[in-house]
Image (cartoon, rainbow, N blue to C red):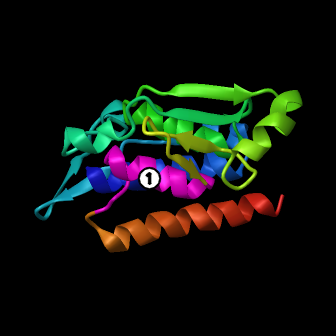
Amino acid sequence: MKTWTAVTLALSIAISSSLSERCFSQAFLLQKPMMTANRGTSRPSASHSQLFAATPDDSSSISILKGCKLTYFGIPGRGEAIRLALAIGGVEFEDHRVPFPAWGKVKPTTPWGAVPVLKLADGSQLAQARSVLRFVGRHTSLYPVEEPLLAQRVDELMDALEDLGSHH
């Protein structure tokens, strides 16, 4: 089940990051229950809600995200995938949405002069959308850390869909 969770999340995240919000909504609406192999037999996978339920193996893993603050504009864009991953992962976070007129004052406070930025409780600022997304995924069991080939495929899909979105 974790394999399909990671692949489904990556697809949803990549679509939300790269394509329009409409396409993202359609991806969720079109998702059908998947079949997973179980020792030579096929069985229906878990329900849609179970596929997106994070089950961290270690509660200390998610604790690094406790009290975090995501800073991004009040639009979906590159911040939406991180918002989704935090929500799906069951992380309570502050969703700081910067009004466009205030951006000039906020920009110099960010690590790279860009958002999204995830600020951890210890004051660390994490930047670059896909890097932050993988970080959140790793700490909420939404990214396949224990399966390097699957992790590469998730990254590949995210990058490919980012490329597609940049051509529009």
How many marks on residues?
A: 1
Name the one closer to the observer, 114 or 91.
Answer: 114
* Residue under the point 43% across and 35% down: 121
Q: Tell me which corner region of the image, top left, top right, bottom left or bottom right, holds residue 97.
A: top right
Asked if one can make out residue 79 in the rendered structure from this viewpoint, the answer is: yes
**Is 27 on the left or on the right of 19, as rendered?**
left
Q: Label 1 is placed on what type of residue?
A: Phe
Where residue 114 appears, x then y in whole percent?
A: 74, 49
Span highlighted in magenta in the image: 128-145
**Is 103 on the left or on the right of 139, as rendered?**
right
**Dot 1 crowding, Cα within 10 Å, few <14, some 14–19, many 20+:** some
* Residue under the point 21% across and 38% down: 59
* Residue under the point 58% across and 27% down: 95
Q: Tell me which corner region of the image, top left, top right, bottom left or bottom right, holds residue 128.
A: bottom right
Name the one closer to the observer, 136 or 30.
Answer: 136
Where residue 69 appears, x then y in whole percent?
A: 54, 32
The residue identified by callout 1 is 135
Q: Is residue 137 above or below residue 83?
A: below
Q: Is residue 109 above or below residue 111?
A: above
- 136 magenta-colored: yes
Name the one closer to the observer, 69 or 18.
Answer: 69
